[in-house]
Amino acid sequence: MTTLVKSNKNGSLATRKSGMTGAQPTWSSWLDELFHNDYLPSVFQSNFNMGMSLPKVNISEKDDAYKVQLAAPGMKKDDFNIEIDNHVLTISSEVEREKEREDDSFTRKEFGYSSFKRSFTLPESVDDAAIKAQYSDGILKLHLPKKEEAKKKPARTIKIS
């Protein structure tokens, strides 16, 4: 699960953690460091045990809303399931793959998402009753408006009496 947070200028959410307890890094912190850095190819971001491939997302913040874009080419809007439960936004899809014929012979086959599930913890400032979604040209776009009290207000001058 991911939390909507500000990222580095390069778009990465990765941060370097020392993972040090005393003088030696722990085994779990070393593995966490290895698999959560940007220098590994994206092939390691697939969950092979679950048969899931995670589509990439872009998340941006404006004064009045968050924008989420999820890249999922080749799908139909009916393939998506979008749910909100206790400030957790979950986008998922389960698409039945076409059955391969026995005479199909592939040298390499990489097409398609069979299923995926991405979850994001929403800030309290999101008006979850007003979230809108649209799918076109292989991109699922979500508009997550902020509550009125959370929107950035223009600066004003206060007179001294």
Image: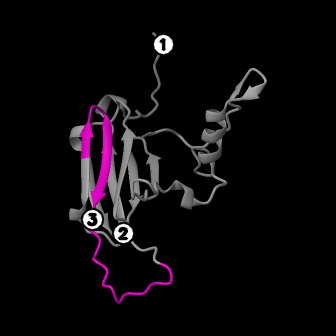
Secondary structure beneath dot 1 equals: loop
Q: Are marks 1 and 2 in contact (CB under 8 Å)?
A: no
Residue reaching furthest to the right: 23
For mark 1, what is the residue? 160
Percent across and percent down for residue 83 are 24, 45
Q: Determine the residue positioned at 26% across, 58% down.
A: 80
Q: Is the residue 154 above or below the residue 76 in the image?
A: above
Percent across and percent down for residue 31 are 63, 41
Residue reaching furthest to the top: 161
Instruction: Determine which quarter of the picture holds residue 63.
Output: top left
Residue 138 disc label: 2
Residue reaching furthest to the bottom: 103
Give the spatial CA distance, label 3 vs label 2.
15 Å
Percent across and percent down for residue 84 are 26, 40
Q: Is the residue 159 above or below the residue 78 in the image?
A: above
Name which residue type carries label 3: Val
For mark 3, what is the residue? 95
Dot 2 alpha-carbon crowd within 10 angstroms: few under 14, some 14 to 19, many 20 or more? some
Percent across and percent down for residue 52 are 40, 57
Give the spatial CA distance, label 3 vs label 1.
64 Å
Closer to us: 98 or 137: 98
Q: Main secondary structure of the magenta part?
A: loop
Residue 106 part of the magenta-drawn span: yes
Q: Is the residue 73 above or below the residue 123 in the image?
A: below
Give the spatial CA distance, label 1 vs label 2.
55 Å
Name which residue type carries label 2: Gly
Instruction: Determine which quarter of the picture holds residue 135.
Output: bottom left
Residue 37 shown left or right of residue 23 in the figure: left
Q: Which region of the structure is painted magenta?
A: 83-108
